Amino acid sequence: MKKISILLVEDNPHEEVLATRILEQQGIFSEVVVAHDGAEALDNLLRNGDQGDKDQVEMPSLILLDLNLPKIHGLEVLRRVRAHPRTKLIPVVIFSSSDENRDIAKAYELGANSYIQKSIDFDEFSESIKRVSEYWGLLNTFIHA
């Protein structure tokens, strides 16, 4: 089984540490890369050769994306990911505290593969990350370049 990488886009340091720890403990993903805001996420995915040939950099197999991010909102990150030829097919799971219908509808309209509402409860938050990891990491089939 080929190990896969994940890009976690999360600005809350506590949620980042918890999610990263759970993802690493699952042992499903070969690498967990973290971006702390929308601009950093887009730079990681779409930088224009200023740090080497981006075509040679391995893209993540999955993006776990918060919505309420500094610098560039998660929905705009999603829009740009879907608009770019190199990233348009990468599965994007929205992992947000927002339960607003407009956010959920817009996320799906822009091409999100899944929308999961974060829980403020530690155990429920942990369980959500485990289930995302298991489904997208073990059951889902990815396109491998």
Image (cartoon, rainbow, N blue to C red):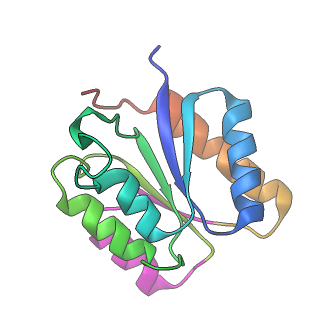
Q: Residue at x 70, y 50 (%)?
A: 19
Residue 86 can be seen, yes or no: yes
Quadrant of residue 92 in the image? bottom left
Quadrant of residue 24 in the image? top right
The quadrant in which the C terminus is found is top left
Q: Is residue 75 above or below residue 126?
A: below
Q: Is residue 145 left or right of residue 24?
A: left
Q: Nearer the viewer, residue 110 or 4?
A: 4
Q: Residue at x 23, y 49 (%)?
A: 49
Q: Is residue 49 left or right of residue 134?
A: left
The verdict on residue 93 being magenta is no
Q: Residue at x 18, y 62 (%)?
A: 83
Q: Nearer the viewer, residue 82 or 54?
A: 54
User: Which residues lie in the magenta part?
Assistant: 98-117
Q: Is residue 135 left or right of residue 44?
A: right
The verdict on residue 114 being magenta is yes
Residue lying furthest top: 1
The spot of residue 53 in percent (x, y) is 23, 40
The spot of residue 98 in percent (x, y) is 58, 79
The spot of residue 77 in percent (x, y) is 36, 68
